[in-house]
Amino acid sequence: MGKKVIFLDIDGTLTEPGHNEPPASALEAVKKAREAGNYVFLCSGRNYAMLSPLLKYGFDGVVASAGGYIVCGEQVIFDCPMTEEQKNRVMEVMKENNIIRTIECMDGAYADEGFRKLVQEQYGESRSSEFLRWREQVEKNLRIFPMERYQDQPAYKFSLLSPSMKNLDRAKEELENDFLFCIQDESQGLVNCELINRKFNKGTGVERVCRYLNIPVSDSVGFGDSMNDKEMMETAGLSICMGNGSQAVKELADEICPPVTEDGIWKAFQKHHLM
């Protein structure tokens, strides 16, 4: 069997949302898969700073910021922050529509006033792994800073909290030519959304890594659970959704494995002879 390239989402897939400690079974699966000659990459909506605590466990690279920043080994093979014009336009449009902005950079995230309060108020209401990830990051004070500390670092994507879908739709009308609006969750009227540059996504991240490694995309395996995994699921040769994933992603995937808390990664790696 030829080498496989395995792409693992983090929140809700490799770990419980917002956590940085994968189950022991998942770590053992990753270790054995690499020992068998396969490549294992993190493939996350997290910015590089927020996923970096996981690098100590041993991976062949990362697809960070939903495909906007890619590292293979020690080599950065793709780095695509927004232009200043794009970033400033997003900031302006979101402010006009009363949408709370979190701007994601290499060193962390910078959030509007009110972000922390809203995330904590929604505790227990949301089932989205992305929203739960933000709640955990907020509660642990992990690389989320007030907007006033932002100093024009390159921005890769935005995470948004909108008071209604109507507000988000108004923003979408002005920005959708350049950006994909990835709706993660709507709870009690509050809409959680990721704004992703149309120049990349997790699917193009899979393609770029495979091209760099000279391995066919058909020999890639993608694991995910939420809507920012959609393009990865559509691109990977084999797509697997976690049992705790959203129904929409389950319908996209080739198959479903047990949840992250029930050794799903280990069981799927074993089933597909990845280790």
Image (cartoon, helix red, strand yellow):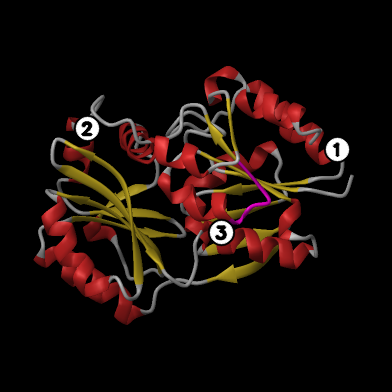
Q: Which amino acid does label 3 sit on?
A: Gly
Specify few, some or many for label 2: CA neighbours under 10 Å numbering under 14, 14-19, or 20 or more: some
Q: Can residue 237 be seen in this view?
A: yes
Frontmost of labels 2 and 1 is 1
**What is the total number of numbered labels drawn onto the structure image?**
3
The quadrant in which residue 181 appears is bottom left
**Region in magenta:** 235-239
User: Element under label 1?
Assistant: helix
Q: Residue 120 carries which label?
A: 2
Marks 2 and 3, how far apart in space?
31 Å
Quarter residue 204 falls in: bottom right
Point out residue 143 in the picture as x, y percentages from the top left corner.
39, 46
Please give the name of the residue rendered at 12% of the width and 48% of the height, measured from the top-left corner. Answer: 163
Q: Does the magenta stretch include residue 176?
A: no
Q: Quadrant of the N terminus?
A: top right
Q: In this view, does 241 lie to the left or right of 98?
A: right
Q: Do the residues labelled 2 and 1 touch (CB within 8 Å)?
A: no
Q: The C terminus is located in which quarter?
A: top right
In the image, 210 versus 153, the foreground residue is 210
User: Which of disc 1 and disc 2 is earlier in sequence?
Assistant: 1
Query: Mark 2 is on which residue type?
Result: Gln
Give neighbour class at mark 3: few <14, some 14-19, many 20+ (Cα, 10 Å): many
Question: Which numbered tag is attached to residue 203?
Answer: 3
What residue would you read off at disc 1? Answer: 35
